[in-house]
Amino acid sequence: MFRPLAMKQLRIQILTEDLPRACLILAELGVFSPDPRPELEQEFPRLPAERYGELYAQAHSRIERILKLIPLDAPLRLPKLREVSEADLERLLVRLREIWGHCSAFEEEFREVGEEERGVRQLEHALDNFAHLDLDLGLLQGEKMFLHLAIGSAPRSNIPQLKEALALAGSFLYVFMESEEHAHIIVAGPRGEREEEVHHLLDTAGFTPFEIPRELNQEPERVRRELEVRRAAIIKRRRELEGRLQGYRDEVREELEAARRTLAMAEPFVQVDTAARSSGLLSMLRGWAPARDLPRIRQALARLDNPFLILERDPTPKERPFVPTAMRPNRLTRPFTALVKEYGIPRYGEIDPTLLFAASFMFMFGMMFGDIGHGLVIVAAAWFGRRALKSFVPFVVGNGLAATLFGFLYGSLFGCGSPRCRTPSTCSRWPLAGGSGSCC
Amino acid sequence: MGMTTQIYAKTRVAVMAAERLLADPELESLLQAPLPQVLETFGLTAAGEEGMAERVFNRTVERVFIRLLMQEHATLLLPFAGPQRDVLVYWSRKFVFFNLKALIRGKINEMAEVQIADQLHELPRRMQLPHEELLRADNPSELLRRLEQGPYQEIARQARKVYEEKNEPFSLDAAIDRLYYAGLLKHVFTTDADEQRPLLEFLGVLLDHQNLLWLLRYRFVYGLPPSETYYLLVPNGRLLGRHTLMQLVEQGSFEEVIAALPGSLGRWLEDDDNSPSRVERALERRAVSEARHVLRRSPSAASRALAYLTLREIDLRRIFAIVQGKVLGLDAATLRFAVGQELPEERRLWA
C-alpha cells in the first residue's frame, strides 16, 4: 500500500529481426523501462539501435523543421502499429531531405522578400527625407568624374566608427536620417584607387545602397508611383510564394502525416538505446517491469513471429538506485500522485507517500476552508465541471467533502455561524464552534 | 550596489583569488610535476587513463577546465545585481561566441555534425545556443536564418552580410569578435559612474591587447587596408584610443607599428624581438600584471571579479598547455614557452 510496485529485471532474448517489433509491443504496453547500463558487452557487442537512433534523430530534426512551415492540424493517430525497419527510416530520411530542401528554399525566398520590403520601406523614408533637404539631388545621381558617391543605410551602431574609418580612406560620411536601428547616409570620396577600399569597408559595415531614381528631382510623384509599383510587386510575390507554399503543403501533407506516424512507431526502438544489444541473429533487451505485469508482457510478446525467452530476477540492493519507480495506480489517488511527483518521485523501495499526502492534504484543506455551504458548492462545481477536471474530480470532491465536514464541526454555513448557535446552550451541538459564532 | 554587498563581493573575490590563482612557485611545481600528479591536482585522473585517444583526452581536459571556470563564474555572480551583474554575465558570452564561430566555420567548410559538435565548448544550459537545431542546419544560410530568429539576431545579420558578400571566414570571426567587445562595452556603459571608470580602465587594457593583435593580424597577415582594419577594431583601449589606432593602422610594417606604440605599451615590447607570438606574450604579461593590480586595488567589486576571471582563464589555459605538453613529451624549455615564460636565447630562432 505504501510501497511502489515490486519490479523485476528482465532480459528478453529474441531474434534481431524481431527487435523493433518487440520494442513497439513493449512501448504499447507501457510497463517496460529500458535499462541502458553497460552489461554483456562481450557477448552482445553490437548496439542495433545506434545507427537506427542516428537515422531517427536526423529524420526527426528534419520533420520538426518542416512542420514549422507546414503545420499538421490533425492530432497524431496510430491506427495500426507496425515495426519500422532501418531501411524504412533510411528511405524516409531521403524523402524528408528532399521535402526540407523545398521548404528551405521557401524560407529563403520569404526572407529575401522580407529584405526587399524592408529596402523599399527604407527608400520611401529616405525619399520623404530628401524632400526636406536643401540639396540638388541631381548631384547625387549617376557616375561622377572625380567623385565617388554612395547613398544607403547602415546599422546605426556602426556609424561613428565607420565615419572615422572612411576618413582614413579619404572619404566623408554624412548622416541625413536616423531610424531606431538604421542610419541613412551619404558617402563621398575621390574616385580612383581607394574606391575599392571604400566599397569593401562599406560592405563590412553592413551598408545597403539605395538607388536614387533619376526622376526624383523633376518628377517625385512618378518616383513614388514606381515605389508603389515595387511594393505591389513585393506583395504579389509574397502572395504567389504563399500560394506555391500552400500548393506544396497540400502535395506533401499526407506524406508528412505518414512520416510522423512512422517516426512515432520508430521511437520505441530508439528509446531502448543501449538497453538493446545484439550478436548476429540474436539480440538481448534489458529493462525493468512491474512483477505483476510479467504475464501481460509474455502474452503480448507471443505476437512475435519467432520464439523468445524472458529471464527475470529481483533487483539487487546495489541496483536499487537504477530501478524505476512504478507508483500503484489508483483512480482516486491519481491526482494526488501527480502532486507528489512534483516534489520528487520516491526511489524504488522507499515509502510511497501518496495516501498519507492525500489524507493530510484533504484534512488541511477542510480545516482551513471548513464551511458546509462552501464545501458543498465545491463538490457541486466538481460534479458539473467533471469533463474539464477529468482525473482531478476525486481531488476536488474530496476537498469539498472535507470542507463540508469541518463546516459541521465549526458550525459555519457560507461564512455565517449557525442560527442555532445564537444561544450558548445550543453551541454544544457544534463541536468546535465555541460560543462566539458570528451570525448573519 | 550597497557598501555591504561591495565588501562581501570583494571578499569573495579575494578568497577565491588566494585559493585558486596560480602563484609563480605553483606554476613552477606544475611544470616540474609528472603528468599523473598534474592530472590528480585537477581531478582529471580518469582522463589520464591509458588507451584514450589524444584528441578525446584533450577535449576531456578542456571541458573540465571550462566547466570549472563556469562554476567559479556562477559563484562570483551571486553577490552582484543589476548592470554590474550584466557585465559579468556578458563576459562569459565569449564562449558562446566561440561556439558560434565554430558552428559557422564548420558549416562553411561542410564538416560533419559530429566533427563540429566536437569543437564546441560544453556550456551551462543558461548560456547555450540552440546547438542541436543549429548543428542540423543544412548550410550556412540556414544556420544564419535560425540565428536571426533568436537573441543573436544582430550578429547573424552582420555575419550574413560578411559571409554572403565576401565568403571569407576570417572576416566573419572579426565581425563576431568586434561585436562581442562592443557588447561588453555597451554593458559597462550602463553601470553607474563609480563602477564605470574602473571597469573601463581594466577593459581598456584588455582591449589594447586585443586591438594590437587584431591590427597586426588584419594589416599584415590578411592584408586589409588601414580603413577596414580600423573599422574592425574597438577604439576604447586605455592606451590605444581612436587617434593612436588611426595612426597605427596607417603604418606600413609590423616593425613600424611596434615602434609607433605609445610609451608605456612600447616599453612592454621593447625588449622583445618582433615576432607576433612574442608580442602576444608580452601583451599577455601586461594584461596579467594589470589584472593583478586591479584584483588588489580596484575600488570596484565588478572590476575585481572581471580581473579574477581573466586571470583564472589565463591560468587554466596555462595548465592545459602544461598537460598537453606533458602528454606530447615536450621538453621543459618548450613547456615554459607554452605557458608564457621565456625561451633560452639559442631556442628563440626556432620558436
Image (spheres, helix red, strand yellow):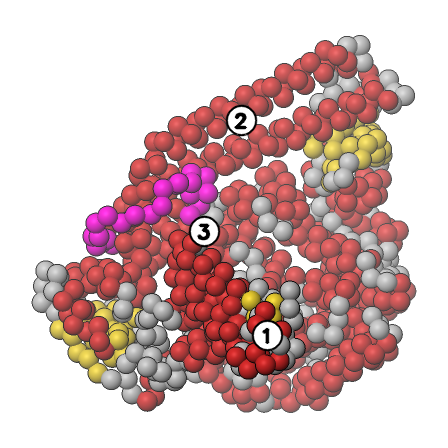
Choose mark 2 or mark 1, whichever is in front: 1
Where is A388 relative to A235, above or below?
A: below
Q: CA distance from mark 1 to mark 3?
A: 74 Å
Please determine if labels 2 and 3 lie on a single subunit. no
How packed mark 3 is, by other alpha carbons closer than 10 Å (few <14, some 14-19, many 20 or more), is: some
Q: State whether residue A30 appears in this view.
A: yes
The residue labelled by disc 2 is A238
Residue at mark 3: chain: B
Query: Residues under labels 2 and 3: Cα distance?
Result: 27 Å
The residue that mark 1 highlights is A421
What x and y, as percent, mark residue B232?
74, 49
Element type at mark 2: helix
| Residue at left offset 43%, top offset 27% | A244
Residue at horizontal 62 percent and vertical 28 percent from the top: A116
Which mark is nearer the camera, 2 or 3? 2
Cβ–Cβ under 8 Å for marks 2 and 3: no
The answer to whether residue A73 is magenta is yes
The residue sitting at 69% across, 13% down in the picture is A225
Q: Residue at x 40, y 66 (%)?
A: A394
The answer to the question of whether label 1 and label 3 lie on touching residues, with beta carbons closer than 8 A, is: no
**Numbered mark located on residue B136 in the image:** 3
Residue nearest the viewer, comparing B313 with B145:
B145
Magenta-colored span = A64-86
Left or right position of B1 against A242: right
Of helix, strand and loop, which mostly describes the magenta segment? loop
The amino acid at mark 3 is Arg
